[in-house]
Every structure is written in structure tokens, then in C-alpha cells.
Image (tube, grey):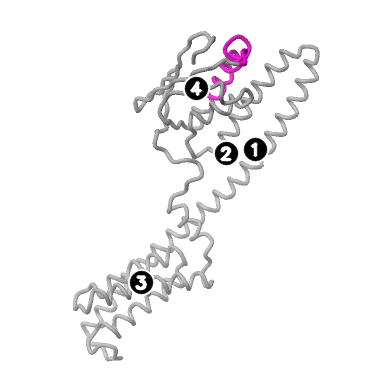
Amino acid sequence: MTGALDPREVVLRASGSPELPELEKRDYLDRLADLSYRIQPFSAAAFGVGIVCLAVVTAVRFGIGWSETDLRYAIFLPAMLATGLLAGAPVAIGVMAASIFIVVWAFMPPYFELKVLTPPEVTDVLWNLFSGVCVVAFAEGSRTVFKRLRAHQLTNDVLVRELAHRGRNIFAVIEVILQKTLASDREQADALLGRLRAVRYANELLINRRDQAINILALLLQEFAPYGEGHLRTNGPKVDVEPETARHLVLLFHELVTNAAKYGALASPAGLVTVEWAWNGQDLRID
């Protein structure tokens, strides 16, 4: 960081990556987990999932054409798995039964007729029934695990929000105590309050973005907000760091900005502070 500041250099081990996603982005697995958690067995949504899955694989099966191979049953296994994961075992069992009926009715000669199965065909049906039961059981077990993990996550989110609320209250009380205790030494009070607010902001980063990386530029803009972004010039690639690393950077940036405001570039209306950083894939270097 340059300006009238004393030259100093920082090297940090960053566990993040320049290409990590931003906080608000969620992948399709998160959406599927939410969907599975919300859909209850025997609900209209559950039956809708089963019907859609069954319709899709039936259409695919008709697209493939009639075949004497085991493909006529195997093509329906993904529908049973998807239904079991999203809608639960009861609807998945219904999809399994409907799949066997569709195969026997539409894909075993004579086609589109109810018929008496031969012993080899009965054996084929029973083996595929066994496979379907295994798939549904696995899907139901996985769904149960996903729902339990999701429930624990929601509980943890509530606890984190409550702790964050209490933490803000504690910081507010400490600020009042500092202001009253150091009423005769305003400069010292402002210095302590600035550090306290930097710590509070760092803690909020850990709470609000505990599973996401944080951009270095966002940290700098937060610290320069009271002085205006026009006093900051940056040069460096987009680099995201883990919340724990960001917590230390917040405190470091606060001290440097404070010193620049007292003795350096920010003490002048036209002052400019330059921050440069470099990333080699493992180490983050800030000047």
C-alpha cells in the first residue's frame, strides 16, 4: 500500500481461489436438496414428480423402439431413483409398479394387450422387480440422510442468526461503555471504536459468509467507505479468500487506513492510496 504510509508488505496463505463463486450463487445440488426437503410423501407434488419421471422415461423408451433386451426394464430405473430421492418411497414404489405394467403391456408381444406371461417372462419380471426394490430402498435411504442434513443446517442457521444478533447487541453495549469511559480522550475513544467496528465487521463476515469466499476488493471498499472510493486505487487480479483469512485482512486494512487518515494520503482531500496485490496460485502478496 502506498501513499505517505510507511512501506510495508504482507504475504498470506490463501485457501481460496480466484475462481470461487460469489455468495449469492447456488448450484443445482442445493436446489435439488431444497426441493427434496419440501416435498412430502403422498403430497400432490410427490405424485407430480412421479408422473413426470415416469412419462419422461416412457417417452424415451418409445423413442428407442421395441427391444427384446433387458433395456425395456433398465430404462425405468432412473425414474424410480429420481422419484425416490425427490418424492419418497411410496410414490417411487408406484412408479416401479407402473413401469412393470408399461413394459408388460407395451413392450412384450403381443403389444398393447394384456397377456399371460411365460415362465421366462415371469422370471424376468421378478428379477427386475428385485432391482427396482433395491433402487427404491437406496433412494429412500439417501433421501432420509439428505432431509436430516438439511434439518440440521436449518437449525444451525437459526442459531447463527441468534448469535449474530446477540453479538451486535454486545458490541453496541461495549461502544457505549467506551464512549462514556473515554469521554475526556476523544482521540483514544475513536481509535478503539474504529478497531472494535473492524472486529465486528470481521465477525459478521465469518457469520454471513462462513461457507463462501470473500473478494479482497470488497474488503478494501468497506474500509475506504468513510473516505470515498475516489481515494482508493487498486491493481490486482480477482482473488477470493476464505472467511478466516478475510477476518485478518479486515483488521490489517483497518490499521493501514487509519494510519493513512492520520499521517498519510487520506489526511489530504486530494490524497490517493494505492493497493496492489499478486496471486501465484498459492500465496497472496499485498503491497
Does residue 102 appear left or right of residue 276 in this picture? left
Q: Which residue is mark 3?
A: 56
Q: Is residue 224 magenta?
A: no
Circle 2 sits in a helix, a strand or a loop, which is it?
helix
Q: Earlier in the sequence, mark 4 or mark 2?
A: 2
Circle 1 sits in a helix, a strand or a loop, which is it?
helix
Q: Earlier in the sequence, mark 3 or mark 2?
A: 3
Label annotation for residue 233:
4
Q: CA distance from mark 3 to mark 2?
A: 40 Å
Identity of the residue drawn at 42% across and 76% down:
94
Identity of the residue drawn at 66% across and 23% down:
196
- Kindly report which numbered mark, 1 or 3, lies closer to the viewer in this rendering: 3
Q: CA distance from mark 3 to mark 4?
A: 55 Å
The kind of residue on which mark 2 rests is Asn
Q: Earlier in the sequence, mark 1 or mark 2?
A: 1
Identity of the residue drawn at 60% across and 31% down:
203
Q: Earlier in the sequence, mark 1 or mark 3?
A: 3
Labelled pair 4, 1 in contact (Cβ < 8 Å): no
Q: Earlier in the sequence, mark 4 or mark 1?
A: 1
Q: CA distance from mark 4 to mark 1?
A: 33 Å
Q: Reply above or below: 45 against 221.
A: below
Q: Residues within 10 Å of mark 2 (few under 14, many from 20)?
A: some
Q: Which residue is mark 2?
A: 208
- State which region is magenta: 247-269
Identity of the residue drawn at 49% across and 16% down:
1
Q: Residues within 10 Å of mark 4 (few under 14, many from 20)?
A: few
